[in-house]
Image (spheres, helix red, strand yellow):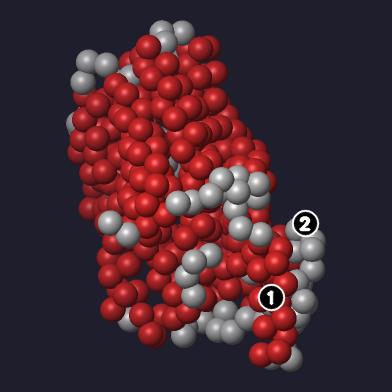
Amino acid sequence: MSIRLCLIVLILVADISDTLLLPFYPQFFSKVFAVNSPQHVGAYIAACCFVVMFSFPIWAKVAKYINELHLWLYTQMISAALATACFYTDSINSFWFLSLLMLFFKASYLLVYPYIIKQEQQDKHLAMVGLFAVILHFGSIVGAFFGGIILTGDNPQNAYLVMASTDVIQTLICLYIIRISAVSWQPKDAQNSLTKIEGTVKDATNETAVIKNEFLPSYIVKLGLITLLVYMSAFLIRPFFAVYWQTVSLSENEILSSVIYSITAWAALLGLWYNHRQQKKVAQSNHKKIIILSICLCILGLFLQGIDNITSIIIGRCLFGWGMFQTTVHLQTLLFTLSHPAQYNTDYSKIHFFQNIGLLLSSVTIGAIVEYTSIHNSFTFAAIGFCLAVILFYLLFIFNTRPSKQCIGVQNV
């Protein structure tokens, strides 16, 4: 098995673990701890986002001194132990502490994305980002399916035993790669590599600029704000979607709810197939225009999902899934195009920070929206957020056409 395939399996296993309970936290807290408050669910999800938001940049800094594979090996071992502890706890306060600490260590696996991208040529970035997006969506399909099965059982906390087992699998994968590749403890000297690459780029074209060592380059701020709005808006409809579907369909079947929830993931699989069939055309396409059109498709999908009709919801899930897939894929491709291989880890962690701010904001507000207004309003507020995202993206990337001086020259963006 190739190293890249091993890492792809690692991503898939990790995402299945992350999405087991994502659509079912309201039911989980109700069944396990007899907590039925939507605000409590929102607060917990917000806390999860907060932990990941601050832990990922920490692991990105640690990865400068410890090779990512060695880092994943030990953090996932600790995560497995904490997941097992979550299974045994019967105190909600202990559950909060143990599960959030688990997420702190689990977040290190997110470094696998820039780790793989760094090893690929730039003309393959779109294909790899698309593959990552589909892996995540496919992971959510499997995760939501098994999560629904677990929720129908006697003990929903079994989900944390599954999480522990996936962490063990990740640990074994990392150990396998380290042994067959003889990966050293310390990473390669990235600074020397950066110097050589910059010299090559300067000789190749006069249009390229020297990378400035700035904490937040302008392209990070711009893409970060768009990412914040996109993920904040998309996440508004996730925590209570299963409850919403059960209300409209008059069915309390958790497995059926997970199937409907996963429609967006199937739409993403179709999007990957389309991008692969049209690989040359998509690679040469204008990422900015595709992002604009895809966000508009998300808005239409949200509008249809907000209608109390089963057919409308299913069509809306399909449109939203396709639009969200293309939006996130082209946003990440735009990031790696504007960034530099030596900065992929840090730049990706900064964008991920903005992403988690969006998730944090949505988690804080969604509980209050559902409790004090209506669950239908989650789609309304999500649509408003996507409208703001498309307007801001146009102003930052279309209306303002002056080239950035903060990064290496970009083609076809």
In the rendered structure, the answer to whether residue 219 lies left or right of residue 36 reads right
Relative image position of residue 68 (x, y in whole percent): 53, 48
Q: Is residue 289 above or below residue 325?
A: below
Q: Toward the viewer: 365 or 76?
A: 76
- Nearer to the camera, 244 or 150: 150
Asked which quadrant contains residue 337, the reply is bottom right
Q: Which mark is residue 196?
A: 1
Image point (35%, 33%), residue name = 168
Q: Mark 2 and mark 1: span between their CA atoms?
A: 22 Å
| Quarter of the image where one finds residue 128 | bottom left
**Measured from the top left, where is residue 279 in percent x and y?**
36, 80
Quarter of the image with the C terminus is bottom right
Quarter of the image for the N terminus: give it.
bottom left
Give the crowd class for mark 1: few <14, some 14-19, many >=20 residues within 10 Å.
few
What type is the residue that disc 1 sits on? Lys
Question: Where does label 2 land, which residue?
Answer: 215
Nearer-the-camera pick, 205 or 310: 205
- Residue 161, percent from left and from top: 32, 24
Quadrant for residue 36, please give it: top left
Q: Nearer the viewer, residue 45 or 99?
A: 99
The amino acid type, in three-letter code, at marker 2 is: Phe
* Viewer-side label of 2, 1: 1
Tell me the SS state at disc 2.
loop
